[in-house]
Image (cartoon, rainbow, N blue to C red):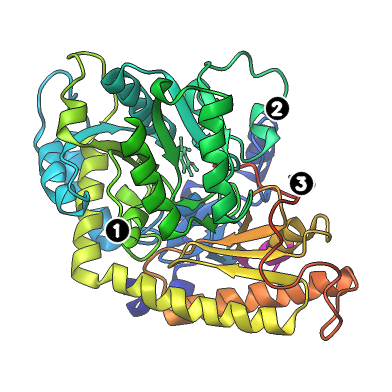
Amino acid sequence: MFQAALRPQALKCSVARTLQASEEARVTAAAKLFPGIKRLSERVLVQGLGSRVWDADGNELIDFASGIGVTSTGHCHPKVVEAVREQAGLASHLQMSVTHHDRALQLIERLEPYALGLDRFFFATSGAEAVEGALRLARQATNRSGVIAFRGGYHGRTAGTLAITTSGIGYRGGNAGPLPYGAFFAPYPGLGGDEAYCKEQLDLLVKQQVAPSEVAAVILEPVLGEGGFVPAPHSFLKHLREWCDAHGALLIADEVQSGAGRTGSFYACEGAGVQPDILTTAKGIASGYPLSAVISKAEIADKQPPGCMGGTYGGNAVACAAAIATLDVFEEEGVLENVRKQGQRATSTLNALKAECPAVVDVRGPGLMLGVEFDRSLKGFAGEVSRECEANGLLALTAGVHEACRLIPPLIVNDEDLDEGLSIFADAVKTIADRHGVSNGEPKPHTTGRPAVLRGLTGGSSFDGA
Ligand SMILES: Cc1ncc(COP(=O)(O)O)c(C=O)c1O
């Protein structure tokens, strides 16, 4: 892993310091941001390298947020930086509705081996745009309008994606306006009930809310991200595949967060042995450059009329070059193996914390999509842990409306950075547990083991990120 050879301390932002705004200009500008944007911290970051970032005062932090699961190859991986520099000097933007461009075509060739047998590609810039594209495609291909999504799911903030997002009420805060009709919600296993109950509810849904013949697609995150980092059982994903086939609906896997290696296989569906009809990918795919994709079976995509898909910046040449370099790093540096190895190491450290600290009730993977859930009766606990981590040099976010933290380090994280970050996290959990009077050895106030399902979706401390 590249950052092992570098000495991040030596950096101390020498380059960034010359580019920095003054403290006064920063404060003035920050006050002008839309208050609708929420953030973990008011700290101002100026530089990143590998799994570490530096703020404007030269403080170093370990980054287990990765720009919300984006900096897959770490900050400023030399191969990605080089590819971006090279492409920026060749052509920064070549528009895909004007002509083909070489980088996008190369990227298709490179992504196809990972695409679970899907072989039509559309490039966009954000995850939400990809999900919008997937929903449109499913509706056009089936000539149906209903979409079944899962309670607790997050798919974006555009009107179409917000209509199927239920991970937290904050996203619809205030009067977000009428959202498109046609969204129906089923419970997500592990969050809304056990697997058998969730299957039953899905069947009930097409008896009570929408006729099966009107369902264009079932969309789910194979590992629920923003809603709490909860993996769906592989057997449930297989069931959904069969269920969709039985009802003539399409299966859309939203792998915006779980894709691009985050779970230890390139896509989480691969781990489950399930082929979706349509897949969305973004975030880590280009190491931080804005790129997303809808990937589909040919017979579905080929039903679209020309002109209905596009976007000015979709498939930007520099972003495509960054994605190709990201795949180079994956293949040359064994990134997926590293995700599996570090995921196992992290899981065993976090399970040791769980055994020691009664506030921790669940540790979840897979890979480096790590969720740690605290007793749900400890209101505000996860948010407090997250802030305590930040104060002590670790960026770690919360997830969902229950008391959970998510740890999403760069996929290239090495032993040293992982262990140091986990140690800050463990200390923070113990400090906050003390503050809540949940000391070592005391019985857990309510839950033990895996959190009880079917509890009300109340309380929580979600970071309203993405
Ligand atoms: C599963 C999933 N889908 C869609 C999105 C939306 O992506 P973006 O924020 O790039 O629009 C996200 C963002 O977190 C996500 O996790």
Please provide percent x and percent y for residue 153.
55, 41
Up the image or down, 284 lies above or below 370; here it is above
Tell me which label, 3 or 2, sits earlier in the chain.
Answer: 2
Can residue 310 be seen from the camera position used here? no
The label on residue 173 is 2
Q: Does the magenta stretch include residue 139?
A: no
Q: Which of marks 1 and 2 is nearer the N terminus?
A: 2
Q: Residue 456 carries which label?
A: 3
**Highlighted range, magenta:** 388-394
Q: Is residue 281 above or below residue 173?
A: below
CB atoms at circles 1 and 2 under 8 Å apart? Answer: no
Nearer the observer, 439 or 319: 439
For the C terminus, give its image quadrant.
top right
**From the viewer's perspective, is the residue at label 1 or at label 2 nearer?**
1
Q: What number is the disc on residue 192?
A: none
Residue type at mark 3 is Gly
Q: Name the residue under label 1.
A: 273
Q: Which amino acid does label 2 sit on?
A: Gly
